[in-house]
Amino acid sequence: MEHLSNDKDKKPIDNDFFEPKSAQIIKDFYDCYLNAIDPSQRKKGKHLLEQWLELVMRQITSPAVFEIYHEAVRAPFDYYRFGLDFVQPLINFAESKFLGKEYLKSIDEQLARKENVILLANHQTEPDPQIISLLLQNEHPQLAEKMIFVAGHRVISDPLAVPMSLGRNLLCIYSKKHINHPSEDKSRKIAHNQRTLKKLQELLSEGGQCIYVAPSGGRDRTNATGIPKVAPFDPVSLELFLLIAKQSRCPTHFYPLALKTFALMPPPQNVEKELGEIRQVAFTPVYLAFGQEIDLDHFPDEEGLDKQNKRIARANYVYNLVKQSYDLF
């Protein structure tokens, strides 16, 4: 790993470098992270925070440019490994649960045959990709590293998120929640998304790809009583991925994936238009559940439905599969 300076005497936050709002967010996150992790890991945690802070400053002074398809940067600095090292101290592995491991054998075999796998999942925290990899890496290291995530523009635009994003394979899109803001930029964002979907089709035609997508279009939020709820899946988004999969030259398999990771880094209660969200973390168990392969052409109660209602029923069917697994935790 490329050396990042680690002057023990330097102040964690340079108030002259950051805008006041960003400086406060970073200070709060810095303290929250150190308080969350086990006291035995404080020294390591401080070192990781200082690395992260330097990477954030590097992003501000010399921003990384993400292509429509971004491949994980592993050298000269291994951003993938850094992301895992950074998130690992926040996970209570002893109480975490990983269900559906039996389905990973089929997934590995399908990918080895150069067939594709699309994981239809919910999404709860910014570091979900790192959490998934940490739970997969011992028994399925190849899948942990090679998985491609359909990512919203915020994780490649916010300097605080970029150090984690640089270490992942990403297909970068603008979600429906942000595509109209600002309104004068909408046509450019739509054109960007169209190029991303074309790239997705190219990747699926090459074969051997595992793609994670959240058909809800964003992170789950809490309900009125403060309990996180799996966000509904968008029929249009699901239909788009199904259509692209059918147009590719290689067979594509669909699996449901449920994540319960909310407590590790909860998102803001409301979808924020501007960058600069508060980040609070906690030491917590995390939960992951793969389900069996889905036949999206044939599913319960789809007989006799017109095209529009069949799309809605299909999205609800997949959503309920994910929710059923989620509710097991």
Image (cartoon, helix red, strand yellow):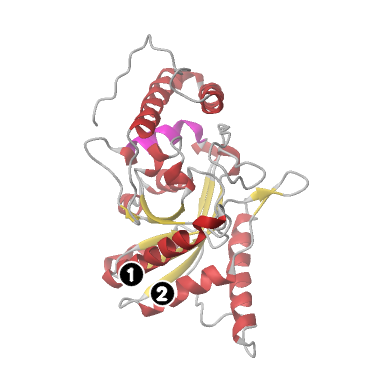
Rendered image quadrant of residue 286: top right
Dominant SS in magenta = helix
Where in the figure is residue 300, as x and y percent of width and height? 62, 80
Which mark is first along the chain, 2 or 1? 1
| Whether residue 243 can be seen here | yes
Instruction: Tell me the number on the disc at residue 60.
Output: none
Q: Does 225 sit above or below residue 85?
A: below
Task: Give the position of the N terminus as an image quadrant.
Answer: top left
Determine the residue located farthest toward the front in the rendered image.
184
Q: Residues within 10 Å of mark 1 (few under 14, many from 20)?
A: many
Q: Position of residue 161 (x, y in %)?
A: 45, 39
- Residue contact between numbered discs 1 and 2, judged by CB atoms under 8 Å: yes
Quick check: 47 left or right of 236? left
Front residue (pair 177, 201):
177
Label 1, label 2: how far apart the Cα atoms are: 8 Å
Which of the numbered marks, if any, corresponds to residue 244? 2
Relative side of 63 to 328, left or right = left
Relative side of 103 to 237, left or right: left
Q: Which residue is mark 1?
A: 204
Q: Is residue 157 above or below residue 70?
A: above
Would residue 289 be counted in the magenta stretch?
Answer: no
* Image x and y of residue 202, in percent: 30, 69
- Residue 85 falls inside the magenta stretch: yes
Q: Secondary structure at mark 2?
A: helix
Counting other residues with Cα less than 10 Å from the Cα at mark 2, is it few (<14), some (14-19), or many (20 or more)?
A: some
Residue at (35%, 57%) from the top-left corner?
A: 68
Secondary structure category for the residue under label 1: helix
Which kind of residue does numbered mark 2 sit on?
Ile
- Part of the protein shown in magenta: 81-91
Amino acid type at circle 1 is Leu
